[in-house]
Image: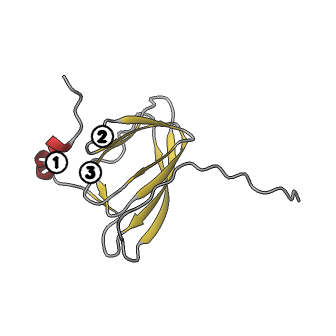
Amino acid sequence: MNASPAAIQLLDHVELDFDLGQPNVVTVTIELEPGSAGSPPHRHSGPVFAYLIEGELIFELEGEPARVIRAGEAFWEPGGDLIHYQAANNLDDGYTRFVAVMVCTPGQEMMTYPSAEELAERAHLRYREAA
């Protein structure tokens, strides 16, 4: 057996400034087929930390421009009231796979979907490119 220590590479570091009580922590893998739009707009009760294993992900949070995350990159979202608009596969010819660790507020669902009315009311909070 090789006695050398494991190589550890820091991918992301976030200092949280809110209390979630005694949260549940859920780890999942997500696989998006080529061209998949992923989940509809949603929110999480607590922060989500993720690592892209394969492919490219179009990632859009409320108030931020959509961006492409590539295999080997880590990303996160704070959860709470913030709407997650996109987590789509950016590839038409390949799968996108990632691991997500979700910190869920006790007694709340891991993921909820805003109504069409709420999305319309919050449309001004979604990032828009300047004309």
In front: 61, or 31? 61
Give the residue type at disc 1: Leu
Element under label 2? loop
Q: Residue pushed farthest top?
A: 131
Identify the image quadrant of the N terminus: bottom right
Q: Mark 2 points at which residue?
A: 64
Image height of 3 relative to 56, above or below = below
Q: Would you say the residues marked 1 and 2 are in contact, meaning their CB atoms lie under 8 Å apart?
A: no
Element under label 3? loop
Give the residue type at disc 2: Glu
Element under label 1? helix
Apparent side of residue 128 relative to residue 65 in the rendered image (left or right): left
Q: Distance between the residues labelled 3 and 1?
A: 9 Å
Q: Mark 1 or mark 2: which comes first in sequence?
A: 2
Residue 96 position, x and y percent, is 49, 40
Q: Which of marks 1 and 2 is in front?
A: 2
Q: Would you say the residues marked 2 and 3 are in contact, meaning their CB atoms lie under 8 Å apart?
A: no
Q: How far apart are marks 2 and 3 (CA)?
A: 11 Å
The colour scheme used here is secondary structure
Q: Mark 1 points at which residue?
A: 119
Residue under the image location 42 percent in, 33 percent down? 90
Residue 86 position, x and y percent, is 33, 42
Residue 120 position, x and y percent, is 12, 45
Give the residue type at disc 3: Ile
Label number found at residue 83: 3
Q: Which of marks 2 and 3 is in front?
A: 2
Identify the image quadrant of the C terminus: top left
Within-10-Å neighbours for mark 1: few <14, some 14–19, many 20+:
some
Residue under the image location 40 percent in, 33 percent down? 35
Q: Mark 2 or mark 3: which comes first in sequence?
A: 2
